[in-house]
């Protein structure tokens, strides 16, 4: 048997290759909507060649076959065929040479660069289009907002590895599945954490949907699925789903929902009523239908959704339309018009209008908080700010010209605030934050051209605090944009419940922009506003609580004064005894002042002797630790290897005392070590008030770095 055929890509060639797959009479090929659509789609991708692979075993059809078709008397067997499409001309000769190990070594790479995808042909005369993965239209040349779902599909063509980035499509076979089943199957293909081989076939989806439903009148095979059965099939797949009726939903709100989930790399299943164009441009109601939303496009000219519609094809373009404009008076007053291209690549008039009636948004099973809670909160924040802005502008207008501030220029006159919402995993959020640069130039906003060093340090600390804090795996992320720049993000714990305190954090992206916006809400927060707590559909109160100035605690004071706790950088061999940290019997722990001066407490320390000293550290809880360095057992034996703050040596100098920060294990990586050492002097004076005025700090950062480098080198050699 011939293993494959290669032909020039043309409409007659495509249709006859489908017919050639099984040597059977496929009566609907030349009038099939999906074949027309796929031909025109691939023509737009500049397809040049098509290859027919005769013997192919498709996982999905094999499962459908074993569940149902195997009992068919005239069964054509379980094997399918597969068509591959390329954007360059290929022939049997160069492909035979490749398979025989001859020919140009670059031909394999050329095949991949020219690969446009594949279409499985099932041995069913009427509904033969199986799993189809076609390369997406390129995004180049579009000046707007566009997002499409995709995943990578690996293809084995006679041992040649190929890949295509797409979302799989197939037509419903009208026997083992319905349009809803196919929509579910396509939606599962979009789930990024699902392995392609773990996605169930249409027959398995249908079986899962019709089982365990009280009063179900459907058997197997199945004609259609109810909304309840669709949700049941998703439950079996352990997916969280949020079902929404669209009868009273406005078009902008619907599109925001679509955009939020597509940005989150999550598909949606859209239930619609289909109206087909009849005579005299009238619209005739056909039936209910389900499609999978896999992308969107929006600019000033139009707003578009991309659908996997099993009656038409993959990535079908659906444009928003007012139903009044097409003489349809049904709720919600807007719809989606479907258009087809002709063979010349020109758009024809809309042949169908889809009127949405339900929407099922899919997400991970851990995502318990519906997106609308985060959306409502973000929308309320935007509305509150814009209301404040309108009042402020009106107040400014009432002032004399010389006293006006808000209307004096773009820098002080902020534009309106808006937001984007998406679901993200905390690991991806952290990577994005870590890679981001702290914004320092605000000239475009009319602010200072640079940040002070203190402001920069504060932002660095907040960035580090955000990255090291604990968060739930999934977060709804609302990005607030003003002046054309992202100002700040608000995070909502997507694993929380509607009755919870879901705002998990606020991250500043642009200091000046965020400050000009958040100061309004900070006033509300610090005033203790709680009049909005009774609302049950958002977390505005939780947002305000995140903005309240926290009451400074002891640990905050200690970290600011003596540095954040550090673990010792390493241990010396002699500091471990039997696997335990060697204890320092000379350790004295001071929590409060003592009456004796330092000279009476430590009379053994010889003045002006570099080899006569004590070691000290500020413990995690703020206690002052002092002891001797015995047999080169240093600060870790003093702290017991517990986290501590700045540490160093205590020496006598003449009639006084000096402390330094000579501790390669604790003091090395503090940026403000000099400030912390000066504060440690005051700590010593508070513990030993009788020695006040006798204690000073010895700053020698370069020497400390040199000592630490020597210690590290010695440790590495050991």
Image: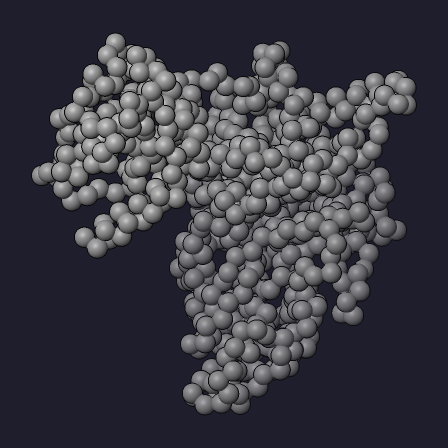
Q: Locate residue 74, reporting x and y percent.
A: 47, 68
Please report the residue visible at 62 percent of the width from the left and 79 percent of the height from the top: 88
Up/down of 51 relative to 635, above or below: below
Whether residue 40 is visible, yes or no, is yes
Query: Outermost residue toward the top?
Result: 595
- The way the protein has been coloured in the rendering is one colour
Q: Residue at x 56, y 36 (%)?
A: 453
Judging depth in this view, the residue of 234 and 68 nearest the camera is: 234
x and y, in percent, of residue 246 in the image: 67, 34
Residue placed most toward the observer, 660 or 322: 660
Above or below: residue 278 compared with residue 390: below
Q: Quadrant of residue 417?
A: top right
* Residue shown at the point (46%, 61%) measured from the top left: 61
Residue at image position (42%, 21%) is: 557
Q: Quadrant of residue 643?
A: top left
Considering depth in this image, is 92 or 228 the residue closer to the camera?
A: 92
In the rendered structure, the answer to whether residue 186 lies left or right of residue 572 reads right
When asked about the image quadrant of residue 610, the answer is top left
């Amino acid at each position: 048997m011939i293993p494959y055929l290669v032909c020039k890509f043309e409409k007659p060639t495509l249709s006859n290759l489908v017919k050639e797959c099984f040597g059977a009479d496929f009566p609907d090929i030349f009038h099939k909507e999906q074949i027309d659509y796929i031909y025109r789609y691939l023509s737009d991708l500049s397809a040049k060649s098509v290859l027919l692979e005769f013997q192919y075993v498709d996982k999905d059809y094999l499962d459908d076959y074993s569940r149902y078709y195997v009992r068919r008397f005239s069964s054509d067997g379980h094997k399918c065929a597969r068509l591959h499409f390329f954007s360059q001309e290929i022939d049997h000769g160069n492909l035979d040479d490749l398979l025989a190990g001859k020919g140009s070594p670059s031909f394999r790479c050329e095949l991949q660069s020219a690969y446009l995808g594949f279409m499985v042909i099932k041995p069913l005369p009427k509904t033969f289009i199986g799993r189809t993965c076609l390369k997406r239209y390129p995004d180049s040349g579009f000046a707007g907002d566009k997002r499409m779902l995709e995943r990578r599909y690996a293809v084995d063509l006679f041992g040649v590895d190929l890949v295509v980035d797409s979302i799989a499509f197939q037509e419903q076979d009208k026997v083992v599945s319905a349009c809803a089943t196919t929509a579910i199957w396509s939606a599962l293909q979009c789930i990024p954490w699902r392995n392609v081989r773990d996605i169930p076939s249409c027959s398995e989806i249908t079986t899962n949907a019709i089982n365990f439903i009280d009063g179900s009148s459907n058997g197997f095979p199945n004609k259609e699925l109810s909304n309840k059965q669709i949700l049941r099939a998703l439950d079996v797949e352990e997916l969280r789903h949020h079902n929404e009726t669209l009868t009273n939903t406005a078009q902008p709100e619907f599109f925001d929902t679509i955009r939020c989930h597509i940005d989150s790399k999550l598909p949606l299943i859209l239930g619609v009523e289909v109206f087909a164009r009849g005579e005299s441009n009238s619209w005739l109601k056909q039936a209910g239908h389900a499609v999978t939303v896999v992308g969107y496009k929006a600019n000033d000219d139009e707003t578009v959704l991309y659908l996997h519609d099993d009656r038409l094809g993959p990535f079908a373009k659906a444009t928003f339309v007012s139903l009044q404009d097409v003489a349809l008076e049904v709720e919600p007053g807007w719809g989606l018009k479907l258009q087809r291209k002709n063979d010349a690549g020109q758009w024809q008039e809309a042949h169908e209008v889809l009127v949405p009636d339900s929407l099922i948004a899919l997400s991970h099973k851990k995502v318990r908080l519906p997106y609308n809670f985060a959306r409502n909160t973000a929308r309320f924040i935007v509305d509150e700010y814009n209301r404040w802005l309108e009042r402020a502008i009106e107040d400014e207008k009432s002032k004399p010209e010389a006293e006006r501030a808000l209307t004096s220029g773009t820098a002080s006159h902020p534009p309106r605030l808006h937001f984007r919402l998406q679901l993200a995993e905390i690991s991806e959020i952290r990577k994005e934050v870590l890679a981001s640069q702290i914004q320092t130039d605000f000239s475009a906003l009319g602010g200072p051209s640079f940040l002070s060093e203190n402001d920069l340090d504060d932002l660095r600390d907040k960035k580090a605090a955000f990255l090291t804090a604990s968060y739930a795996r999934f977060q709804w992320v609302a990005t607030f944009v003003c002046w054309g720049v992202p100002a700040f993000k608000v995070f909502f714990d997507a694993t929380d419940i509607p009755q919870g305190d879901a705002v998990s954090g606020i991250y500043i992206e642009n200091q000046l922009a965020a400050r000009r916006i958040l100061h309004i809400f900070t006033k509300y927060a610090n005033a203790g506003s709680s009049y909005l707590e009774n609302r049950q559909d958002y977390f505005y109160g939780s947002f305000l609580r995140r903005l309240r100035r926290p009451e400074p605690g002891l640990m905050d004071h200690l970290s600011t004064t003596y540095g954040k706790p550090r673990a010792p950088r390493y241990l010396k061999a002699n500091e471990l005894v039997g696997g335990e940290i060697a204890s320092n019997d000379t350790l004295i722990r001071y929590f409060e002042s003592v009456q004796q001066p330092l000279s009476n407490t430590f009379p053994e320390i010889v003045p002006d002797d570099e080899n006569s000293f004590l070691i000290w550290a500020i413990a995690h809880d703020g206690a002052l630790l002092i002891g001797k360095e015995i047999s080169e057992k240093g600060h870790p034996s003093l702290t017991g290897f517990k986290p501590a703050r700045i540490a160093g040596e205590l020496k006598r100098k003449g009639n006084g005392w000096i402390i330094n920060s000579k501790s390669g294990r604790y003091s090395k990586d503090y940026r403000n070590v000099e400030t912390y050492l000066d504060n440690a002097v005051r700590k010593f004076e508070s513990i030993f008030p009788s020695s006040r005025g006798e204690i000073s700090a010895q700053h020698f950062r370069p020497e400390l770095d040199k000592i630490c480098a020597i210690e590290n080198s010695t440790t590495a050699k050991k």
